[in-house]
Image (cartoon, grey):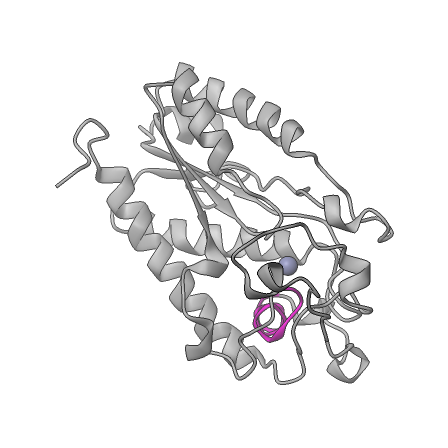
Amino acid sequence: MRPYILAETNWKQIQETNFELAILPWGATEAHNYHLPYATDVIEADAIAAEAARHAWEQGAKVIVLPTIPFGVNTGQTDILLDINLHPSTQLVILTDIIEVLNRQGIHKLLILNSHGGNDFKTMLRELGVRFPNMFLSTCSWFHVLDKAQYFDEPKGDHADEMETSLLLHLRPDLVRPLDEAGDGAARKWKLTALREGWAWAERRWSQVTSDTGIGNPKQATAEKGERYFADVSRKIGDFLVELAAADIRDLYA
Ligand SMILES: [Zn+2]
């Protein structure tokens, strides 16, 4: 039993701990090319949150990892079978209820550990910060923490790519199909200049951008690359957890 994982701990242990920081991992359930499981984002969120929290707990930080929310925003994948979409407005309602509990019970720091590119919690946290002024609300997408070019030969992808495939080869090799069955993750670019250059944004129609649902070529993925990336990303987030757990939320600016 890991005392920093809510799903594993118990009422006796919980009563003896003064938790300072709750971590809410948030994933998605969606197709990941032909070779990775639908729960890829959930598996990544579970593992990175747990390893970061272990690192923090061992340094005395009283952190608690809540169960991962398994569904995310998949509004661009409505025609991809069994991609389960949660609308952002639904996420706001879920988040409000969770924060209401934490606020009432005196756990005044929350980090959402985001594991899916379609999830975007910033505007929600702005709104909830007004409604819960005693809470410190923060979010971090683990896939933005490190420079992928330092770890992978094909760092440009963003879905079922070399990075995600390497992570899954490390974390759950039993769920990864042989890489010669994977599509190449080729993605079509926008015709509109501003969107192609990235200084304007519109949602991508996923099934028109990629034929195998992947974006980024997974073929050079290895478990060794995944292990190294996993260790570094978990440690860096773990260091953040230590700092956040110890922080005085009335005195945050140097
Ligand atoms: Zn993913």
Residue 143 placement (x, y as % from top left): 49, 60
Residue 55 can be seen in this image: no
Q: Residue furthest front?
A: 193
Q: From which residue to which does the magenta span run? A: 159-171
> Residue 171's quadrant in the figure?
bottom right
Residue 85 placement (x, y as % from top left): 74, 41
Q: Is residue 32 left or right of residue 241?
A: right
> Residue 26's quadrant in the figure?
top right
Residue drawn at point x = 53 percent, y = 76 percent: 155
* 186 is within the stretch colored magenta: no
Residue 193 placement (x, y as % from top left): 62, 64
Depth check: give the residue in front, 59 or 123.
Answer: 123
Depth check: give the residue in front, 96 or 156.
Answer: 156
Residue drawn at point x = 56 percent, y = 72 percent: 163
Residue drawn at point x = 31 percent, y = 50 percent: 240
Can you tell me which quadrant of the image ligand 1 is in?
A: bottom right
- Count the marks: 0
Residue 158 can be seen in this image: yes
Q: Main secondary structure of the magenta part?
A: helix
Residue drawn at point x = 64 percent, y = 28 percent: 89
Depth check: give the residue in front, 186 or 171.
Answer: 186
Q: Is residue 174 above or below residue 101?
A: below
Q: Is residue 248 left or right of residue 175?
A: left
Residue 254 placement (x, y as % from top left): 12, 41
Q: Is residue 70 above or below residue 98?
A: below
